[in-house]
Image (cartoon, rainbow, N blue to C red):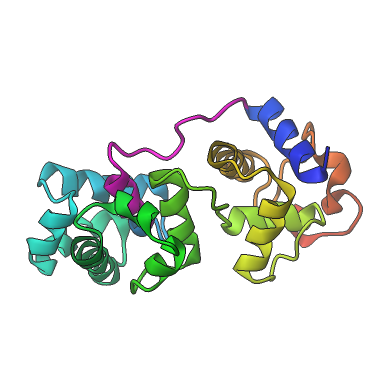
């Protein structure tokens, strides 16, 4: 068993199966959420998503046809409303004009990731979140939590380019979308509950023996 699978099993032992971690009733809801959660918490993004759903602005066609000022007012809880309203509009235009108003049609493209990345406002993490969670395609999502935890475990360089880190995971793991979802969810859980940016809670962590924080003087271990 390689180290990445060993860590996965240890995380699962600590927190149990996370299962349906990224909420959304439709694939397009998940795509909207992936944009709304940029630079904010999921709690704030979810409030904005619910506002759109309540106003029946949760489909590509509805967002395509509505005024952008209306979108701004509804997604205010997610922050950066001017930028994100534009990004949602761009996603809706792309979905309606290139995917026959169905985000699932990305799976029919030969290069779905590149197609998503051509949409202004969709970066690599957002694109991979959409592909993984909305479309069940095996793209590993790399977020700040992934960089933090696995740099402390000496498996990646925290400043390494996104695609390099993603490829490291995908080379070490089976190409399995459900595994990637579960692994990402466990990483998020571990970062929030134990492997915090400052003052991590190392005692009792099953990854403690692998962690650089146990062998080096690290400023993150100091209380603030």
Residue 18 located within the stretch drawn in magenta: yes
In the image: residue 220, left or right of residue 83: right
Task: Tell me, yes or no, if residue 223 can be seen here.
Answer: no
Start and end of the magenta stretch?
16-34
Classify 44 as above or below 93. above
Residue 174 located within the stretch drawn in magenta: no
| Point 36% across, 55% down: residue | 108
Task: Tell me, yes or no, if residue 93 can be seen here.
Answer: yes
| Quarter assignment of residue 168 | bottom right
Classify 126 as above or below 114. above
| Point 85% across, 53% down: residue | 212
Foreground: 221 or 18? Answer: 18
Foreground: 204 or 119? Answer: 119
Query: The N terminus lies in which quarter of the figure?
Result: top right
Q: Position of residue 123 (x, y in %)?
A: 44, 68
Foreground: 196 or 65? Answer: 65
Q: Position of residue 211 (x, y in %)?
A: 83, 48
Classify 44 as above or below 207. below
Q: In the current view of this chain or complex, which residue is farthest to the right? A: 215
In the image: residue 139, left or right of residue 63: right
| Point 67% across, 42% down: residue | 174
Q: Position of residue 208 (x, y in %)?
A: 83, 40
Q: Position of residue 106 (x, y in %)?
A: 35, 56
């Amino acid at each position: 068993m390689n180290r990445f699978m060993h860590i996965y099993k240890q995380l699962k032992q600590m927190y149990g199966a996370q299962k349906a971690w990224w909420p959304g009733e439709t694939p397009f809801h998940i795509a909207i959420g992936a944009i709304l959660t940029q630079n904010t918490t999921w709690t704030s993004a979810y409030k904005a998503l619910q506002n759109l759903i309540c106003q029946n602005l949760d489909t590509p066609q509805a967002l395509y046809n509505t005024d952008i000022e209306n979108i701004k007012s509804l997604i205010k809880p997610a922050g950066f409303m001017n930028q994100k309203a534009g990004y949602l509009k761009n996603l809706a235009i792309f979905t309606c004009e290139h995917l026959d108003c169905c985000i699932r049609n990305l799976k029919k493209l030969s290069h779905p990731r590149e197609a998503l990345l051509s949409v202004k406002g969709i970066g690599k993490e957002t694109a991979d979140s959409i592909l993984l969670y909305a479309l069940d395609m095996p793209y590993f999502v790399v977020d700040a939590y992934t960089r933090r935890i696995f740099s402390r475990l000496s498996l990646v360089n925290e400043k390494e380019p996104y695609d390099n880190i993603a490829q490291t995971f995908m080379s070490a793991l089976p190409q399995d979308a459900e595994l990637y979802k579960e692994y990402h969810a466990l990483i998020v859980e571990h970062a929030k509950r134990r492997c915090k940016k400052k003052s991590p809670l190392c005692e009792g962590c099953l990854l403690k023996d692998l962690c650089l924080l146990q062998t080096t003087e690290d400023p993150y271990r100091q209380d603030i």
